[in-house]
Amino acid sequence: MASKSTLNAKNLEALGTERLAQLLIEISTGDAAAKRKLRLALAGAEGPREAAREIAKRLTSIAKARTFVNWQNRKPLVKDLQTQRSAIMDEIAPHDPGEALALLWRFMALATSVFERCDDSSGTVIDIFHQACTDLGEVAKAADAASEALARQVLDALQDNGFGQYDGLIATIAPALGPEGVAHLKTLVEELGRTPVPVPPKSEWLAVGWGSGGTRYAHEMEERARQSTVEMALKDIADVQGDVDGFIAQYDPKTRKVPKIAAEIAQRLLAAGRAGDALGFIERAEVDNARWIPPEWQDARLAVLEALDRKDEAQAFRCACFERDLSGEHLRAYLKRLPDFEDIEAEERAMAHAAAHPDLLTALAFFLNWPSLGNAARLLIDRQDEVNGDHYEFLAPAAETLAEKHPLAATVALRAMIDFTLNEGRQKRYGYAAQHLATCADLAGRIEDFGPVEPHLAYAARLKAEHGKKTGFWSRMDG
Protein backbone atom coordinates (compact mmCIF):
# COMPACT_ATOMS: atom_id res chain seq x y z
CA MET A 1 0.00 0.00 0.00
CA ALA A 2 1.39 3.40 -1.04
CA SER A 3 2.36 5.87 1.69
CA LYS A 4 0.15 8.92 2.15
CA SER A 5 3.20 11.06 1.32
CA THR A 6 3.66 9.39 -2.07
CA LEU A 7 3.11 11.81 -4.94
CA ASN A 8 0.02 10.58 -6.75
CA ALA A 9 -3.34 12.04 -7.73
CA LYS A 10 -5.29 10.45 -4.88
CA ASN A 11 -2.97 11.77 -2.16
CA LEU A 12 -2.92 15.25 -3.68
CA GLU A 13 -6.72 15.35 -3.84
CA ALA A 14 -6.77 14.81 -0.10
CA LEU A 15 -5.04 18.17 0.40
CA GLY A 16 -8.14 19.99 -0.72
CA THR A 17 -8.64 22.58 -3.44
CA GLU A 18 -7.56 25.58 -1.39
CA ARG A 19 -4.21 24.07 -0.39
CA LEU A 20 -3.58 22.78 -3.91
CA ALA A 21 -4.28 26.23 -5.33
CA GLN A 22 -1.74 27.77 -2.94
CA LEU A 23 0.87 25.18 -3.88
CA LEU A 24 0.31 25.77 -7.60
CA ILE A 25 0.79 29.51 -7.14
CA GLU A 26 4.06 28.87 -5.26
CA ILE A 27 5.34 26.35 -7.78
CA SER A 28 4.51 28.53 -10.79
CA THR A 29 6.16 31.66 -9.35
CA GLY A 30 9.14 32.41 -11.57
CA ASP A 31 8.20 29.61 -13.98
CA ALA A 32 6.69 31.16 -17.12
CA ALA A 33 5.88 27.80 -18.70
CA ALA A 34 3.98 26.62 -15.63
CA LYS A 35 2.03 29.89 -15.50
CA ARG A 36 1.05 29.57 -19.16
CA LYS A 37 -0.15 26.03 -18.54
CA LEU A 38 -2.25 27.15 -15.58
CA ARG A 39 -3.78 30.02 -17.57
CA LEU A 40 -4.60 27.59 -20.35
CA ALA A 41 -6.26 25.23 -17.88
CA LEU A 42 -8.33 28.11 -16.44
CA ALA A 43 -9.35 29.20 -19.93
CA GLY A 44 -10.29 25.64 -20.79
CA ALA A 45 -12.51 25.45 -17.72
CA GLU A 46 -14.52 28.37 -19.14
CA GLY A 47 -14.98 26.54 -22.43
CA PRO A 48 -13.26 25.82 -25.77
CA ARG A 49 -13.80 29.35 -27.07
CA GLU A 50 -11.87 30.90 -24.17
CA ALA A 51 -9.17 28.21 -24.49
CA ALA A 52 -8.85 28.99 -28.19
CA ARG A 53 -8.43 32.68 -27.39
CA GLU A 54 -5.66 31.89 -24.91
CA ILE A 55 -3.87 29.65 -27.44
CA ALA A 56 -4.14 32.31 -30.16
CA LYS A 57 -2.58 34.90 -27.82
CA ARG A 58 0.35 32.59 -27.12
CA LEU A 59 0.88 31.79 -30.79
CA THR A 60 1.05 35.52 -31.51
CA SER A 61 3.66 35.96 -28.78
CA ILE A 62 5.80 33.13 -30.16
CA ALA A 63 5.59 34.62 -33.66
CA LYS A 64 6.80 38.01 -32.41
CA ALA A 65 9.75 36.59 -30.41
CA ARG A 66 13.21 37.39 -31.76
CA THR A 67 15.56 35.89 -29.12
CA PHE A 68 17.93 33.30 -30.59
CA VAL A 69 17.46 29.82 -29.11
CA ASN A 70 20.53 27.56 -29.09
CA TRP A 71 20.74 23.90 -28.18
CA GLN A 72 21.37 24.75 -24.53
CA ASN A 73 18.16 26.71 -23.96
CA ARG A 74 15.95 25.00 -26.54
CA LYS A 75 13.96 22.98 -23.98
CA PRO A 76 11.52 25.78 -22.91
CA LEU A 77 10.66 26.51 -26.56
CA VAL A 78 10.08 22.83 -27.26
CA LYS A 79 7.87 22.51 -24.20
CA ASP A 80 5.90 25.63 -25.17
CA LEU A 81 5.28 24.38 -28.71
CA GLN A 82 4.25 20.95 -27.46
CA THR A 83 1.86 22.51 -24.96
CA GLN A 84 0.15 24.64 -27.63
CA ARG A 85 -0.17 21.77 -30.11
CA SER A 86 -1.54 19.42 -27.47
CA ALA A 87 -4.00 22.05 -26.26
CA ILE A 88 -5.35 22.52 -29.77
CA MET A 89 -5.85 18.79 -30.22
CA ASP A 90 -7.10 17.98 -26.71
CA GLU A 91 -9.06 21.09 -25.71
CA ILE A 92 -10.36 22.53 -28.99
CA ALA A 93 -10.54 19.82 -31.67
CA PRO A 94 -13.08 17.54 -29.90
CA HIS A 95 -15.52 20.46 -29.44
CA ASP A 96 -14.87 22.76 -32.40
CA PRO A 97 -12.79 21.17 -35.19
CA GLY A 98 -13.22 24.26 -37.39
CA GLU A 99 -11.58 26.48 -34.77
CA ALA A 100 -8.90 23.83 -34.15
CA LEU A 101 -8.12 23.75 -37.87
CA ALA A 102 -7.65 27.53 -37.95
CA LEU A 103 -5.36 27.34 -34.92
CA LEU A 104 -3.32 24.52 -36.46
CA TRP A 105 -2.73 26.60 -39.59
CA ARG A 106 -1.56 29.44 -37.34
CA PHE A 107 0.65 27.03 -35.43
CA MET A 108 2.25 25.75 -38.64
CA ALA A 109 2.81 29.34 -39.82
CA LEU A 110 5.15 29.79 -36.83
CA ALA A 111 7.70 27.40 -38.33
CA THR A 112 9.62 29.89 -40.46
CA SER A 113 10.08 32.47 -37.70
CA VAL A 114 10.94 29.75 -35.17
CA PHE A 115 13.58 28.09 -37.32
CA GLU A 116 15.14 31.41 -38.27
CA ARG A 117 16.02 31.93 -34.60
CA CYS A 118 16.45 28.37 -33.38
CA ASP A 119 19.20 25.76 -33.48
CA ASP A 120 17.38 22.51 -34.24
CA SER A 121 20.38 20.27 -34.89
CA SER A 122 18.68 17.46 -32.93
CA GLY A 123 15.51 17.62 -35.03
CA THR A 124 13.32 17.99 -31.94
CA VAL A 125 11.52 21.12 -33.11
CA ILE A 126 10.82 19.96 -36.66
CA ASP A 127 9.31 16.76 -35.22
CA ILE A 128 6.70 18.88 -33.42
CA PHE A 129 5.76 20.63 -36.66
CA HIS A 130 5.61 17.35 -38.54
CA GLN A 131 3.21 16.02 -35.91
CA ALA A 132 1.11 19.18 -36.24
CA CYS A 133 1.13 18.70 -40.01
CA THR A 134 -0.30 15.20 -39.48
CA ASP A 135 -2.88 16.69 -37.11
CA LEU A 136 -4.03 19.00 -39.93
CA GLY A 137 -5.33 16.04 -41.91
CA GLU A 138 -7.22 14.60 -38.95
CA VAL A 139 -8.81 17.91 -37.93
CA ALA A 140 -9.59 19.04 -41.50
CA LYS A 141 -11.56 15.83 -42.04
CA ALA A 142 -13.49 16.32 -38.81
CA ALA A 143 -14.14 19.97 -39.67
CA ASP A 144 -15.56 18.99 -43.07
CA ALA A 145 -13.71 21.95 -44.58
CA ALA A 146 -14.72 23.17 -48.04
CA SER A 147 -12.45 21.33 -50.45
CA GLU A 148 -11.64 24.28 -52.75
CA ALA A 149 -10.75 26.60 -49.89
CA LEU A 150 -8.72 23.84 -48.23
CA ALA A 151 -6.88 23.19 -51.50
CA ARG A 152 -5.92 26.86 -51.68
CA GLN A 153 -4.63 26.76 -48.10
CA VAL A 154 -2.55 23.68 -48.95
CA LEU A 155 -1.02 25.40 -51.97
CA ASP A 156 -0.15 28.50 -49.91
CA ALA A 157 1.44 26.27 -47.26
CA LEU A 158 3.56 24.39 -49.77
CA GLN A 159 4.99 27.68 -51.04
CA ASP A 160 6.13 28.45 -47.48
CA ASN A 161 7.86 25.11 -46.89
CA GLY A 162 11.40 26.43 -46.54
CA PHE A 163 12.24 24.21 -43.56
CA GLY A 164 10.33 21.09 -44.61
CA GLN A 165 7.59 21.64 -42.03
CA TYR A 166 4.89 20.80 -44.59
CA ASP A 167 6.55 17.66 -45.95
CA GLY A 168 3.87 14.98 -46.35
CA LEU A 169 1.00 17.51 -46.15
CA ILE A 170 -0.72 16.40 -49.36
CA ALA A 171 -0.83 12.75 -48.33
CA THR A 172 -2.12 13.51 -44.85
CA ILE A 173 -4.80 15.97 -45.96
CA ALA A 174 -5.99 14.09 -49.06
CA PRO A 175 -8.83 12.27 -47.21
CA ALA A 176 -10.18 15.66 -46.09
CA LEU A 177 -9.89 17.08 -49.62
CA GLY A 178 -11.57 14.12 -51.25
CA PRO A 179 -11.12 13.26 -54.96
CA GLU A 180 -12.59 16.58 -56.15
CA GLY A 181 -10.46 18.61 -53.77
CA VAL A 182 -7.30 16.76 -54.81
CA ALA A 183 -8.16 17.37 -58.46
CA HIS A 184 -8.69 21.07 -57.72
CA LEU A 185 -5.36 21.21 -55.89
CA LYS A 186 -3.68 19.67 -58.93
CA THR A 187 -5.21 22.37 -61.14
CA LEU A 188 -3.94 25.08 -58.79
CA VAL A 189 -0.44 23.59 -58.74
CA GLU A 190 -0.35 23.32 -62.55
CA GLU A 191 -1.43 26.96 -62.81
CA LEU A 192 1.38 27.91 -60.45
CA GLY A 193 3.80 26.00 -62.68
CA ARG A 194 2.70 28.01 -65.69
CA THR A 195 3.00 31.34 -63.88
CA PRO A 196 6.62 32.56 -63.86
CA VAL A 197 7.91 34.65 -60.99
CA PRO A 198 7.75 38.31 -62.12
CA VAL A 199 11.00 40.23 -62.37
CA PRO A 200 10.93 43.09 -59.83
CA PRO A 201 10.80 46.60 -61.30
CA LYS A 202 14.15 48.31 -61.71
CA SER A 203 13.17 50.93 -59.15
CA GLU A 204 12.84 48.22 -56.47
CA TRP A 205 16.19 46.54 -56.94
CA LEU A 206 18.05 49.82 -57.27
CA ALA A 207 16.47 50.97 -54.00
CA VAL A 208 18.02 48.07 -52.08
CA GLY A 209 21.39 48.45 -53.81
CA TRP A 210 21.19 45.41 -56.12
CA GLY A 211 22.99 45.44 -59.42
CA SER A 212 21.45 43.69 -62.42
CA GLY A 213 23.44 40.53 -61.63
CA GLY A 214 22.16 40.35 -58.06
CA THR A 215 18.59 40.91 -59.20
CA ARG A 216 18.90 38.20 -61.83
CA TYR A 217 20.33 35.74 -59.27
CA ALA A 218 17.57 36.45 -56.73
CA HIS A 219 14.94 36.03 -59.44
CA GLU A 220 16.47 32.73 -60.58
CA MET A 221 16.49 31.39 -57.02
CA GLU A 222 12.84 32.30 -56.55
CA GLU A 223 11.95 30.73 -59.87
CA ARG A 224 13.76 27.50 -58.98
CA ALA A 225 12.00 27.35 -55.63
CA ARG A 226 8.65 27.75 -57.35
CA GLN A 227 9.42 25.03 -59.88
CA SER A 228 10.64 22.69 -57.13
CA THR A 229 7.41 23.25 -55.19
CA VAL A 230 5.36 22.44 -58.27
CA GLU A 231 7.28 19.26 -59.07
CA MET A 232 7.15 17.91 -55.53
CA ALA A 233 3.47 18.73 -55.18
CA LEU A 234 2.57 17.05 -58.46
CA LYS A 235 4.50 13.93 -57.39
CA ASP A 236 2.62 13.78 -54.11
CA ILE A 237 -0.70 14.35 -55.87
CA ALA A 238 0.10 11.59 -58.35
CA ASP A 239 0.77 9.24 -55.42
CA VAL A 240 -2.52 10.15 -53.79
CA GLN A 241 -4.38 9.59 -57.06
CA GLY A 242 -2.52 6.37 -57.81
CA ASP A 243 -1.26 7.93 -61.05
CA VAL A 244 2.11 6.24 -61.61
CA ASP A 245 2.66 7.82 -65.02
CA GLY A 246 1.92 11.25 -63.54
CA PHE A 247 4.59 10.57 -60.91
CA ILE A 248 7.12 9.48 -63.55
CA ALA A 249 6.36 12.55 -65.67
CA GLN A 250 7.80 14.82 -62.97
CA TYR A 251 11.30 13.47 -63.67
CA ASP A 252 13.21 14.14 -66.85
CA PRO A 253 14.65 11.07 -68.65
CA LYS A 254 18.16 11.64 -67.26
CA THR A 255 16.96 11.92 -63.65
CA ARG A 256 14.96 8.69 -64.03
CA LYS A 257 18.29 6.88 -64.38
CA VAL A 258 19.48 7.93 -60.91
CA PRO A 259 19.35 4.64 -58.94
CA LYS A 260 17.33 6.02 -56.01
CA ILE A 261 14.80 7.68 -58.33
CA ALA A 262 14.58 4.54 -60.48
CA ALA A 263 13.82 2.57 -57.31
CA GLU A 264 11.01 4.97 -56.33
CA ILE A 265 9.48 4.63 -59.79
CA ALA A 266 9.87 0.83 -59.81
CA GLN A 267 8.18 0.40 -56.43
CA ARG A 268 5.16 2.39 -57.63
CA LEU A 269 4.96 0.43 -60.87
CA LEU A 270 5.11 -2.80 -58.87
CA ALA A 271 2.23 -1.65 -56.68
CA ALA A 272 0.27 -0.94 -59.86
CA GLY A 273 0.94 -4.47 -61.17
CA ARG A 274 3.40 -3.35 -63.84
CA ALA A 275 6.45 -5.42 -62.92
CA GLY A 276 7.77 -5.51 -66.49
CA ASP A 277 7.83 -1.71 -66.73
CA ALA A 278 9.43 -1.58 -63.29
CA LEU A 279 12.27 -3.83 -64.43
CA GLY A 280 12.94 -1.51 -67.35
CA PHE A 281 13.53 1.45 -65.04
CA ILE A 282 15.71 -0.66 -62.72
CA GLU A 283 17.88 -1.90 -65.57
CA ARG A 284 18.26 1.54 -67.15
CA ALA A 285 19.50 3.04 -63.88
CA GLU A 286 23.12 4.17 -64.02
CA VAL A 287 24.59 1.96 -61.29
CA ASP A 288 28.34 2.12 -60.74
CA ASN A 289 29.47 -1.12 -59.12
CA ALA A 290 32.73 0.52 -58.12
CA ARG A 291 30.86 2.93 -55.87
CA TRP A 292 28.19 2.84 -53.20
CA ILE A 293 24.86 1.49 -54.47
CA PRO A 294 21.69 2.81 -52.78
CA PRO A 295 19.99 0.00 -50.82
CA GLU A 296 16.64 1.26 -52.18
CA TRP A 297 17.71 0.27 -55.68
CA GLN A 298 18.90 -3.16 -54.51
CA ASP A 299 15.63 -3.80 -52.68
CA ALA A 300 13.57 -2.63 -55.65
CA ARG A 301 15.48 -4.89 -58.05
CA LEU A 302 14.91 -7.90 -55.81
CA ALA A 303 11.21 -7.10 -55.46
CA VAL A 304 10.85 -6.81 -59.24
CA LEU A 305 12.69 -10.07 -59.92
CA GLU A 306 10.53 -11.88 -57.37
CA ALA A 307 7.36 -10.39 -58.88
CA LEU A 308 8.45 -11.67 -62.31
CA ASP A 309 9.19 -15.12 -60.81
CA ARG A 310 12.87 -14.85 -61.77
CA LYS A 311 13.92 -16.42 -58.50
CA ASP A 312 17.33 -17.72 -59.63
CA GLU A 313 18.33 -14.21 -60.73
CA ALA A 314 17.08 -12.83 -57.42
CA GLN A 315 19.19 -15.34 -55.50
CA ALA A 316 22.26 -14.55 -57.56
CA PHE A 317 21.72 -10.84 -56.90
CA ARG A 318 21.34 -11.40 -53.14
CA CYS A 319 24.62 -13.28 -53.15
CA ALA A 320 26.29 -10.51 -55.15
CA CYS A 321 24.99 -7.85 -52.73
CA PHE A 322 26.43 -9.75 -49.79
CA GLU A 323 29.79 -10.31 -51.46
CA ARG A 324 30.06 -6.65 -52.36
CA ASP A 325 28.93 -4.99 -49.12
CA LEU A 326 28.90 -7.84 -46.56
CA SER A 327 25.19 -7.20 -46.14
CA GLY A 328 23.89 -9.54 -43.46
CA GLU A 329 20.30 -8.84 -44.51
CA HIS A 330 20.93 -10.11 -48.04
CA LEU A 331 22.89 -13.11 -46.80
CA ARG A 332 20.06 -14.16 -44.46
CA ALA A 333 17.52 -13.83 -47.27
CA TYR A 334 19.80 -15.86 -49.57
CA LEU A 335 20.36 -18.67 -47.05
CA LYS A 336 16.67 -18.82 -46.16
CA ARG A 337 15.77 -19.73 -49.74
CA LEU A 338 18.35 -22.54 -50.09
CA PRO A 339 17.39 -26.22 -49.74
CA ASP A 340 18.09 -27.94 -46.42
CA PHE A 341 21.77 -28.61 -45.68
CA GLU A 342 22.95 -26.47 -48.62
CA ASP A 343 22.58 -23.41 -46.42
CA ILE A 344 25.23 -24.69 -43.98
CA GLU A 345 27.93 -24.94 -46.65
CA ALA A 346 26.84 -21.62 -48.15
CA GLU A 347 27.14 -19.92 -44.77
CA GLU A 348 30.65 -21.32 -44.28
CA ARG A 349 31.68 -19.95 -47.68
CA ALA A 350 30.16 -16.59 -46.74
CA MET A 351 32.14 -16.45 -43.50
CA ALA A 352 35.37 -17.19 -45.40
CA HIS A 353 34.53 -14.46 -47.91
CA ALA A 354 33.90 -11.97 -45.11
CA ALA A 355 37.17 -12.85 -43.36
CA ALA A 356 39.05 -11.97 -46.55
CA HIS A 357 37.26 -8.66 -47.11
CA PRO A 358 39.79 -5.87 -47.75
CA ASP A 359 38.17 -3.54 -45.22
CA LEU A 360 38.82 -5.04 -41.81
CA LEU A 361 36.29 -2.89 -39.94
CA THR A 362 33.53 -3.78 -42.41
CA ALA A 363 34.30 -7.47 -41.90
CA LEU A 364 34.45 -7.05 -38.13
CA ALA A 365 31.09 -5.25 -38.09
CA PHE A 366 29.56 -8.07 -40.13
CA PHE A 367 30.81 -10.78 -37.76
CA LEU A 368 29.69 -8.90 -34.66
CA ASN A 369 26.22 -8.25 -36.07
CA TRP A 370 25.69 -11.73 -37.57
CA PRO A 371 26.70 -12.68 -34.84
CA SER A 372 29.77 -14.86 -35.17
CA LEU A 373 32.08 -13.84 -32.34
CA GLY A 374 34.55 -16.65 -33.04
CA ASN A 375 35.11 -15.35 -36.55
CA ALA A 376 35.34 -11.79 -35.25
CA ALA A 377 38.03 -12.87 -32.78
CA ARG A 378 40.05 -14.73 -35.41
CA LEU A 379 39.81 -11.75 -37.75
CA LEU A 380 41.29 -9.38 -35.15
CA ILE A 381 44.09 -11.76 -34.20
CA ASP A 382 45.00 -12.76 -37.78
CA ARG A 383 44.92 -9.16 -39.06
CA GLN A 384 46.02 -7.28 -35.96
CA ASP A 385 48.41 -5.08 -37.91
CA GLU A 386 45.48 -3.64 -39.90
CA VAL A 387 43.40 -2.50 -36.91
CA ASN A 388 43.11 1.31 -36.92
CA GLY A 389 42.88 2.47 -33.33
CA ASP A 390 41.39 5.81 -34.34
CA HIS A 391 37.99 4.10 -34.66
CA TYR A 392 37.46 4.03 -30.90
CA GLU A 393 33.69 4.50 -31.21
CA PHE A 394 33.60 1.09 -32.92
CA LEU A 395 36.51 -0.76 -31.30
CA ALA A 396 35.58 0.01 -27.68
CA PRO A 397 32.16 -1.69 -27.82
CA ALA A 398 33.68 -4.50 -29.94
CA ALA A 399 36.27 -5.18 -27.22
CA GLU A 400 33.54 -5.18 -24.58
CA THR A 401 31.49 -7.69 -26.59
CA LEU A 402 34.46 -10.02 -27.11
CA ALA A 403 36.04 -9.74 -23.65
CA GLU A 404 34.15 -12.55 -21.92
CA LYS A 405 34.76 -15.41 -24.37
CA HIS A 406 37.58 -14.01 -26.52
CA PRO A 407 39.91 -12.01 -24.25
CA LEU A 408 42.84 -12.17 -26.66
CA ALA A 409 40.84 -10.57 -29.48
CA ALA A 410 39.51 -7.95 -27.08
CA THR A 411 43.12 -7.22 -26.10
CA VAL A 412 44.05 -6.64 -29.75
CA ALA A 413 41.22 -4.09 -30.11
CA LEU A 414 42.16 -2.31 -26.89
CA ARG A 415 45.87 -2.18 -27.77
CA ALA A 416 45.07 -0.66 -31.16
CA MET A 417 43.35 2.26 -29.40
CA ILE A 418 46.18 2.59 -26.88
CA ASP A 419 48.84 2.60 -29.60
CA PHE A 420 47.02 5.19 -31.71
CA THR A 421 46.49 7.47 -28.72
CA LEU A 422 50.14 7.40 -27.65
CA ASN A 423 51.70 7.41 -31.12
CA GLU A 424 49.60 10.42 -32.13
CA GLY A 425 49.89 12.16 -28.77
CA ARG A 426 46.13 12.51 -28.34
CA GLN A 427 46.20 13.83 -24.80
CA LYS A 428 42.42 14.07 -24.48
CA ARG A 429 42.27 10.29 -24.86
CA TYR A 430 44.94 9.48 -22.30
CA GLY A 431 42.35 8.70 -19.63
CA TYR A 432 40.62 6.18 -21.90
CA ALA A 433 43.94 4.67 -22.97
CA ALA A 434 44.91 4.18 -19.33
CA GLN A 435 41.61 2.41 -18.69
CA HIS A 436 42.20 0.22 -21.75
CA LEU A 437 45.67 -0.76 -20.55
CA ALA A 438 44.29 -1.64 -17.11
CA THR A 439 41.65 -3.79 -18.82
CA CYS A 440 44.36 -5.52 -20.86
CA ALA A 441 46.14 -6.38 -17.60
CA ASP A 442 42.94 -7.95 -16.25
CA LEU A 443 42.32 -9.89 -19.47
CA ALA A 444 45.91 -11.18 -19.52
CA GLY A 445 45.19 -13.37 -16.50
CA ARG A 446 42.60 -15.27 -18.56
CA ILE A 447 44.74 -15.77 -21.66
CA GLU A 448 46.60 -19.09 -21.63
CA ASP A 449 48.39 -18.65 -24.94
CA PHE A 450 49.04 -15.28 -26.60
CA GLY A 451 50.11 -17.03 -29.82
CA PRO A 452 50.99 -14.41 -32.46
CA VAL A 453 50.09 -11.57 -30.08
CA GLU A 454 52.78 -9.96 -27.91
CA PRO A 455 52.39 -11.06 -24.23
CA HIS A 456 51.04 -8.42 -21.89
CA LEU A 457 54.20 -7.84 -19.78
CA ALA A 458 56.32 -7.44 -22.91
CA TYR A 459 53.75 -5.07 -24.43
CA ALA A 460 53.58 -2.94 -21.28
CA ALA A 461 57.38 -2.78 -21.09
CA ARG A 462 57.60 -1.68 -24.71
CA LEU A 463 55.01 1.04 -24.11
CA LYS A 464 57.10 2.32 -21.21
CA ALA A 465 60.28 2.32 -23.31
CA GLU A 466 58.66 4.07 -26.31
CA HIS A 467 56.37 6.49 -24.50
CA GLY A 468 57.90 6.84 -21.04
CA LYS A 469 58.06 10.64 -21.33
CA LYS A 470 54.29 10.97 -21.82
CA THR A 471 53.70 11.73 -18.16
CA GLY A 472 50.09 12.72 -18.80
CA PHE A 473 49.38 9.10 -19.63
CA TRP A 474 51.51 7.38 -16.98
CA SER A 475 50.21 9.64 -14.22
CA ARG A 476 46.74 8.32 -14.97
CA MET A 477 48.08 4.77 -14.80
CA ASP A 478 49.61 5.51 -11.41
CA GLY A 479 46.26 6.85 -10.27
Image (cartoon, rainbow, N blue to C red):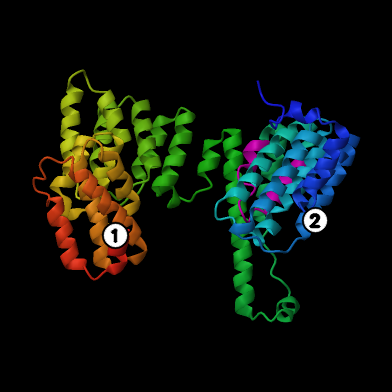
Q: Residue 41, percent across and down?
A: 83, 39
Secondary structure state at the residue bearing disc 1: helix
Please determine whether, in this image, residue 337 is positioned above or below residue 279.
above
Residue appearing at x 52%, y 39% in the figure: 245
Residue appearing at x 27%, y 46% in the figure: 362
**Residue segment shown in magenta:** 150-173
| Residue 478, numbered label | 1
Residue 359 showing in the rendered view:
no
Q: Nearer the viewer, residue 284 or 359?
A: 359
Give the residue type that dot 2 points to: Ser
Q: Quadrant of residue 100?
A: top right
Give the residue type that dot 1 points to: Asp
Which quadrant does the N terminus fall into? top right
Please determine whether, in this image, residue 81 is positioned above or below residue 47.
below
Q: Earlier in the sequence, mark 1 or mark 2?
A: 2
| Residue 61, numbered label | 2
Which quadrant does the C terminus fall into? bottom left
User: Extreme top residue here?
Assistant: 340
Secondary structure state at the residue bearing disc 2: helix
Horizontal side of residue 426 vs 463, given as left or right: right
Please rate how many residues cluster around mark 1, counting C-alpha atoms within 10 Å: few if below 14, some from 14 to 19, many from 20: few
Badge 1 vs badge 2, beta-carbon distance below 8 Å:
no
Q: Residue 210, percent across and down?
A: 66, 79
